[in-house]
Image: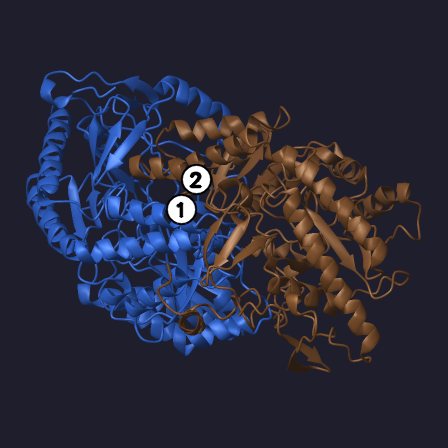
Chain colours: A brown, B blue
């Protein structure tokens, strides 16, 4: 239901919504009025294939989830200081998916709140304050979470918010584009090399007689550019941290709930047991619900700090009913299994496409969490940032929503609702081939100031980030222009 | 709908829910299975009159709000990087209730997230980091909010989380029980005396060449014990802060949306214009939605920091639909007007009761935000904490839910859903008289170790706090006992 024309909505938004909030495709944003499964519809009823909204995990507006929420909303929605079955059922259900010791749950409203609470738990348990985080990590938008989010603080230019001295940033274990690359070192040495960076920080802290509080990492790193850790990495790191008396936090806010396909939680693919797990986004299929799960010991240390934990909405009966319904759907519709098979198929198809297009430097993925690293040159691995931006813009014209991410914004990022099908994959691949072919042809036919050159732009944020492009605009030598697509008329359908 | 017996629910909760989370009436907690308007129902269908749940502002499970949420949940629930009418409609509606300059909105999921963002906005705008907060204040559960919440950090006993050096705590302007009391100073001097405490901090900071970032206060202070500020207090404070280049933040998370009766926002009762307003709890009638509203200038300073603000669920179409529906109901059912008349009636009735019972030291309130300060002695104002606890426990037996708060837990706190009626007030007052009479009689008839003596207990937290009592248990000389009520059999109905 549209109340205003798109122009009016945009005008009102510019007038009243915080200036630091940005839009996808900001020069020609999408107005989405409805959604279902893996499809979003604009005000003209155009259907877009959604490859990026991992939050709507079991599919947009899943009726089973919606009805569960509705039933509970009609009955009771209050806080967790009253006994309620939904709260304990959800806690029981969540802990049943986790290793034995992870049996105690604190509910929050967002991944950011979960990160903040995890930091508090770690500090009270270890009596330490030194925190180790990965470069390019993003763990949330509250101050404490930003402190351990180089991805975000790296964009702060007024000098007001910087990493404090107790935050230690170690290289992201990206074997394609990180500090140690698979082209320079044997692949089976990667985990060792990257884990040693954590060890070096811990050794330094020991010398300085400082106590490590915690190490935190997403179990696959999203904002860093869909980075899959080398085998054995977290095992080695967790051992170093534990030996130093620290806590290991697995951030599963984006990558949990079966997305990895092979396992329900992505840390399980690294064969480790964290001390704290933070979960969120997919948990409520769009409804604000998140949680921190930890051991009894850590929970008791927190209780013994004397401070009660109360979160007004955290663990309310409606949020819990919705999260329980999401878990039902994952199970009943075998969405984890789908993530595994569809994800494998997608990566295989992309690797086929890679053979035709040298611009594709790397294809990587676990389940329905996939990245394509675009390069100007496969030898130097110079990031093809402008090209990535162009791909996203053109794919939008083809009614496919993708995004870019990574420090160079050159990674095409895919993390669709978990009901994504092989047919959806085929469509994305077909359109991708078409767009990459356009780029290849244009690069051959045009001069150095190719249509593809572009200003680097990124949404310095979280999951749904990176798409800040315009299907019809580009930049030549810093000057914005409107692209004129010629030929291939079937491929330049103008959405607007 | 009950899935487990109350005992099983409690057992599962003890097993799986974070140990730092506590229950109301923890020795005999309430299991609430449904709620409607100002009534909550336990698993045996007993109806309780709810005098404390300010979150369910327009009444528990209001059908108009529930249907609005349901309709939107069925249609679309996605993030604010896509254009949507609900987002701009809510922003427009909210800003229309505020002074002209407060025209820019950032949406969050909770009051805690709102406080955190308000701090960030203030720091980036002023380039200062010194924060001034009131004693006994509570502004949220994330680390940055706890830093300015003496109410909560005061309970931390392990020394891990303390106020950092940039936090400056000034006395709460409680004219009955604070640093300056109406019995010692002329009442028209109170605002001056308390505001001077802020000035003293600012003067000290100036000497130290430190820049004030912000002053934050709830516009009436809830956790401090339902404190209503003396007339002119915020005007004087805001002037001092503004003159020093600082930002004034009005925390309306608990007290906004018409609760004060005379005005929609409680800061308006003090005739001031804040630079930032944080709102939350009542906004979603239980659904997690909150916001920060500020000026264009401050918003632009934040944008110019280079950091995008993105909050995954913040401002999603469902949260906005629900908040819009809440605002509709407030208007259509004239709930602000009801808060004014019912609140005035309640305070008048309580003042009548005060005449009969010397234990009532003070009755204060604005709209449906009312406190009763219980004292052992009207001269010394010694807090009657155990008696307050007993009142709460006995009222629960009478199917009335109240809570205590304040640094001595001796304030009976009332902040019910806004549909509360005069008949509800009459019932509460009638039962209160009965319970106070019991206390009076017992104190006369028993020895010094009266049935009323009790261990001080409090929920060191937020809005719905303070009820940590048991109708049937008490403490004599530190030993727990089970109270045996004799006689007055009509008044000792055992709910359990």
A483 or B306: nearer the viewer: A483
Residue at x-position 73% and y-position 55%: A135
Pointer 2: residues within 10 angstroms few (<14), some, or many (20+)? some
Residue at x-position 92% and y-position 53%: A183
| Residue named by callout 1 | B74
Vertical side of A110 occupied by A275: above or below: above
Q: Are marks 2 and 1 on the same chain?
A: no
Vertical side of B97 occupied by A430: above or below: above
In the picture provided, is A322 more to the left or to the right than B342? right
Q: Position of residue A89 (x, y in %)?
A: 46, 27
Q: Which numbered tag is attached to residue A63? A: 2
Q: Position of residue A465 (x, y in %)?
A: 61, 59
In the picture provided, is B382 more to the left or to the right than A299? left
Quadrant the C terminus of chain B occupies: top left
Task: Choose top left, top right, bottom left or bottom right for residue B349.
Answer: top left
Asked whether the residues under the numbered discs 2 and 1 touch, taking CB atoms below 8 Å apart as contact, a structural biologist would say yes
A86 or B471: nearer the viewer: A86
In the picture provided, is B271 more to the left or to the right than B106? left
Q: Is residue B286 visible?
A: yes
A175 or A5: nearer the viewer: A5
A7 or A271: nearer the viewer: A7
Pointer 1: residues within 10 angstroms few (<14), some, or many (20+)? many
Task: Choose top left, top right, bottom left or bottom right for residue A442.
Answer: bottom right
Which subunit holds the residue at mark 1? Answer: B
Q: Is residue A78 visible?
A: no
Residue at x-position 31% and y-position 50%: B68
Q: Position of residue A426 (x, y in %)?
A: 69, 49
Quadrant the N terminus of chain B occupies: top left
Residue at x-position 12% and y-position 50%: B342
Task: Choose top left, top right, bottom left or bottom right for residue B396.
Answer: top left
Q: Position of residue A107 (x, y in %)?
A: 48, 38
Q: CA distance from mark 2 to mark 1?
A: 7 Å
């Amino acid at each position: 239901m549209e109340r205003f024309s798109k122009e009016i909505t945009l005008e009102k938004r510019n007038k009243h919504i915080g200036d630091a909030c940005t839009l996808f495709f900001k020069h020609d944003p999408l107005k989405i009025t409805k959604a279902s499964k893996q499809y979003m519809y604009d005000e003209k009823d155009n259907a877009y294939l959604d490859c990026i909204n991992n939050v709507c995990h079991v599919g947009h507006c899943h009726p089973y989830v919606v009805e569960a929420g509705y039933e509970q909303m009609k009955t009771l929605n209050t806080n967790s200081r009253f006994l309620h079955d939904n709260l304990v059922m959800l806690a029981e259900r969540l802990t049943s998916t986790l290793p034995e010791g992870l049996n105690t749950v604190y509910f929050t409203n967002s991944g950011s709140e979960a990160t903040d609470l995890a930091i508090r738990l770690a500090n009270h348990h270890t009596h330490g304050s030194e925190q180790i985080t990965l470069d390019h990590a993003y763990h949330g938008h509250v101050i404490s979470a930003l402190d351990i989010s180089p991805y975000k603080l790296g964009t702060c230019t007024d000098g007001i918010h910087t990493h404090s001295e107790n935050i230690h940033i170690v290289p992201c274990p990206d074997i394609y584009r990180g500090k140690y690359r698979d082209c320079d070192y044997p692949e089976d040495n990667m985990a060792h090399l990257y884990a040693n960076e954590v060890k070096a920080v811990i050794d330094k802290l020991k010398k300085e007689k400082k106590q490590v509080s915690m190490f935190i990492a997403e179990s696959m790193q999203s904002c860093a550019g869909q980075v899959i850790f080398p085998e054995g990495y977290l095992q080695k790191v967790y051992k170093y941290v534990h030996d130093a008396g620290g806590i290991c936090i697995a951030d599963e806010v984006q990558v949990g709930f079966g997305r990895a396909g092979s396992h329900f939680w992505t840390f399980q693919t690294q064969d480790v047991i964290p001390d704290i797990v933070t979960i969120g986004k997919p948990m409520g299929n769009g409804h604000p619900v998140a949680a921190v799960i930890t051991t009894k010991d850590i929970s008791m240390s927190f209780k013994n700090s004397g401070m009660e934990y109360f979160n007004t909405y955290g663990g309310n009966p409606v949020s819990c009913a919705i999260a329980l319904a999401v878990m039902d759907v994952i199970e009943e519709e075998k969405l984890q299994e789908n993530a595994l098979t569809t994800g494998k198929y997608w990566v295989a198809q992309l690797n086929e496409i890679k053979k035709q297009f040298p611009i594709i430097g790397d294809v990587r993925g676990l389940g329905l969490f996939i990245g394509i690293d675009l390069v100007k040159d496969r030898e130097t691995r110079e990031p093809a940032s402008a090209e990535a931006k162009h791909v996203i813009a053109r794919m939008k014209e083809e009614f496919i929503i993708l995004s870019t991410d990574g420090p160079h914004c050159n990674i095409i990022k895919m993390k669709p609702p978990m009901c994504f099908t092989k047919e959806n994959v085929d469509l994305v691949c077909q359109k991708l081939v078409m767009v990459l072919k356009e780029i290849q042809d244009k690069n051959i036919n045009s001069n150095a100031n190719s249509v593809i050159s572009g200003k680097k732009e990124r949404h310095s944020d979280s999951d749904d980030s990176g798409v800040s492009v315009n299907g019809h605009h580009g930049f030549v030598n810093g000057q914005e222009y409107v692209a004129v697509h010629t030929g291939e008329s079937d491929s330049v359908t103008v959405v607007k």
